[in-house]
Image: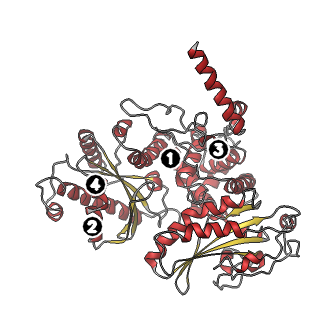
């Protein structure tokens, strides 16, 4: 009887959750499996698709999205040198061991104290750009701690003449060391593995595989990566699990393609194109509440998995068709078998909207394909989702026209019309006088920008926000970066006062304890006709090359002027408001 009562209570609680979150209910769950892309028939128009794929590749090369062999070899050399340095450093931390310098000069062949360096992200997937960074994970043996990583290892990097732009961020959600080595950008994270035997065995396997791939000239054909299985999670804290899962997600995505070289090539070309499209259209930034590299990679892999024989040109069309019509918040799953921890691994928090109140509020769930399954796009808000939907729908139409032969791929990557679509914009100016201090100040402001975007859509403000995920960096008297949000105001509104929202945001950011003299943040409203010219730098109709940011102004232009689009004509605008003159204090 008690068990039945408990079941009844759980059922009642779930019903209450569903009533609070109408997006997440049983009817919606039943509809979500219908989020399927139509599988393509690759027998039709094979020659046409092959030509389109060739032209897509040529376009990616012309846009400098594909690194040449020289750049690839340089990255591999930096990775090998980093691995050698890490091994010498790890050895020096053992009691009674030689110093780091002595270990570098005379490397120890004993692998039991050696860490492993693994790549993940765009580099691991083979879709990095020539100027992109390399995301790396240090899997360290038990005698090495995170304090050592941010202590003595940072000191070693600081003393290395090949290393520049060194910025350790130990307080980040996933602690990271950012630096450049031989002009290759590196983001280095850390996890300590408890199983030394497993780590040693994996290093030996990597070494044997590397020997097998050496060509006749003694050059290694490709970088060999360690295979990280579920057992590596045993004994790890949550911070280390987050660090390791970047590698595991990249590994799962590669495994889904099943080693099919043609499919891998089509996946990479499609993902390159999707990421470039997202950048051009101001949709690429996890920090700003849009989608980042791992999100786009999971979505492209989802389409590739269901269309294993499709060419890259067809996959790109199917990508836009699929996600322009996706019924969000229906989740995107690559695997549904990760709800329970692997044997020996403790239970960790997972994404479960039936049990977790916050998970049920997520708007665009894209779930990581390994344990613990998490929503990789939890930052997405209503304004960002609105822009993603609009641009995906527009891209779907363009890709259909491209596949039909009436347009070329270039139309997908032309300058976006964002800065012509709205009558009014909010301009955010991040300013600093010192390069190092500006970098810290910019990072803080960027991480808080979602608060400003989301706040505009609160009932108290009532504005529709359209953020553009790009910062325009400028060197003027000091350092400056500019961010823009398109604004739409309620129909019939006589006055929209943004002063309380802006004042609260400025107060939150300006009270940062690391702020120093010269770090400034200003915000003001600017009409479309008064936007700074640098935002149009990709537009053919802009002839003025001035790069002076616009100044605060009370001048407002009617959205129905002769230059306004039909879309703008339906958008109300605020009356003259005194807050414009003093929110820049």
Residue at x 65%, y 48% (from the top left corner): 319
Q: Nearer the viewer, residue 332 or 156?
A: 156
Q: Regarding mark 1 in the picture, which secondary structure is present there? A: helix
Between the C-alphas of marks 1 and 4, the distance is 26 Å
Residue 361's disc number: 3
Which badge, 2 or 3, comes first in the chain's sequence?
A: 2
Q: Are marks 1 and 4 in contact (CB under 8 Å)?
A: no
Which badge, 1 or 3, comes first in the chain's sequence?
A: 1
- Residue 218 lies, with reference to residue 230, above or below; the image says below
Q: Regarding mark 4 in the picture, which secondary structure is present there? A: loop
- Residue at the top extreme of this rendering: 1
Which badge, 1 or 4, comes first in the chain's sequence?
A: 4
* Disc 4 target residue: 216
Seen in the image, is 60 located left or right of residue 542?
A: left
Between the C-alphas of marks 4 and 2, the distance is 39 Å
Q: Quadrant of residue 26?
A: top right
* Disc 1 target residue: 264
Residue at x 75%, y 56% (from the top left corner): 459
Mark 1 neighbour density, 10 Å: few (under 14) some (14–19) many (20 or more): many
Which badge, 4 or 2, comes first in the chain's sequence?
A: 2
Residue at x 50%, y 67% (from the top left corner): 443
Between the C-alphas of marks 1 and 2, the distance is 40 Å
Q: Nearer the viewer, residue 568 or 184?
A: 568
- Residue 167 lies, with reference to residue 117, above or below; the image says below
* Disc 2 target residue: 155
Where in the figure is residue 317, as x and y percent of width and height? 67, 49
The colour scheme used here is secondary structure
- Residue 486 lies, with reference to residue 398, above or below; the image says below
Q: Are marks 4 and 3 in contact (CB under 8 Å)?
A: no
**Which mark's residue is nearer the viewer, 2 or 3?**
3
Q: Where's the N terminus, which quadrant?
A: top right
Where in the figure is residue 93, as x and y percent of width and height? 19, 55
């Amino acid at each position: 009887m008690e068990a039945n009562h408990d079941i009844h209570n759980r059922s009642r609680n779930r019903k209450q959750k569903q009533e609070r979150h109408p997006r997440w209910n049983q009817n919606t769950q039943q509809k979500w499996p219908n989020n399927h892309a139509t599988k393509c028939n690759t027998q039709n128009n094979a020659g046409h698709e092959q030509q389109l794929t060739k032209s897509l590749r040529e376009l990616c090369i012309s846009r400098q999205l594909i690194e040449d062999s020289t750049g690839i070899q340089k990255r591999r050399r930096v990775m090998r040198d980093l691995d050698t340095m890490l091994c010498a450093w790890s050895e020096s931390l053992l009691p009674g061991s030689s110093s780091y310098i002595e270990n570098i000069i005379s490397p120890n062949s004993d692998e039991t104290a050696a860490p492993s360096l693994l790549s993940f992200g765009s580099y691991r997937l083979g879709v990095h750009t020539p100027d992109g960074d390399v995301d790396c994970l240090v899997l360290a043996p038990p005698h090495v701690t995170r304090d050592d990583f941010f202590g003595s290892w940072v000191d070693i990097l600081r003393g290395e003449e090949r290393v520049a732009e060194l910025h350790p961020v130990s307080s980040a959600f996933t602690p990271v060391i950012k630096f450049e080595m031989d002009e290759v950008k590196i983001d280095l994270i850390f996890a300590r593995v408890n199983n030394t035997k497993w780590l040693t065995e994996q290093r030996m396997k990597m070494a044997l595989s590397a020997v097998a791939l050496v060509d006749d000239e003694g050059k290694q054909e490709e970088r060999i990566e360690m295979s990280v299985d579920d057992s590596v999670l045993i004994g790890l804290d949550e911070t280390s699990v987050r660090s390791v899962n970047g590698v595991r997600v990249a590994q799962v995505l590669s495994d889904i393609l099943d080693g099919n070289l043609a499919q891998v090539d089509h996946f990479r070309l499609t993902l390159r194109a999707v990421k470039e499209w997202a950048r051009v259209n101001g949709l690429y930034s996890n920090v700003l509440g849009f989608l980042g590299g791992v999100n786009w990679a999971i979505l492209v892999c989802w389409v590739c998995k269901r269309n294993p024989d499709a060419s890259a040109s067809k996959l790109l069309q199917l990508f836009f068709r699929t996600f322009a019509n996706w019924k969000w918040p229906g989740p995107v799953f690559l695997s549904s078998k990760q709800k329970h921890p692997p044997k020996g691994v403790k239970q960790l928090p997972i994404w479960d909207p039936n049990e977790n109140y916050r998970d049920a509020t997520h708007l665009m769930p894209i779930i990581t394909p390994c344990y613990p399954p998490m929503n990789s796009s939890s930052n997405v808000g209503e304004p960002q989702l609105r822009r993603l939907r609009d641009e995906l729908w527009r891209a779907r139409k363009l890709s259909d026209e491209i596949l039909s032969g009436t347009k070329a791929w270039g139309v997908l990557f032309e300058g976006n019309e964002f800065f012509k679509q709205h009558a009014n914009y909010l301009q955010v100016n991040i300013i600093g006088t010192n390069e190092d201090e500006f970098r810290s100040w910019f990072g803080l402001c960027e991480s808080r920008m979602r608060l400003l975007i989301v706040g505009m859509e609160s009932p108290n403000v009532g504005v529709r926000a359209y953020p553009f995920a790009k910062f325009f960096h400028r060197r003027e008297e000091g350092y400056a970066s500019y961010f823009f949000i398109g604004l739409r105001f309620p129909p019939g509104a006589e006055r929209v006062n943004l002063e309380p929202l802006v004042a609260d945001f400025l107060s939150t950011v300006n009270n940062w304890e690391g702020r120093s003299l010269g770090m400034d943040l200003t915000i003001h409203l600017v009409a479309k006709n008064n936007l700074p010219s640098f935002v149009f730098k990709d537009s053919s109709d802009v002839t003025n090359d001035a790069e002076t940011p616009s100044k605060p102004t009370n001048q407002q232009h009617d959205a129905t002027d002769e230059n306004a689009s039909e879309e703008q004509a339906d958008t109300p605008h605020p009356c003259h408001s005194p807050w414009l003159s003093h929110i820049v204090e």
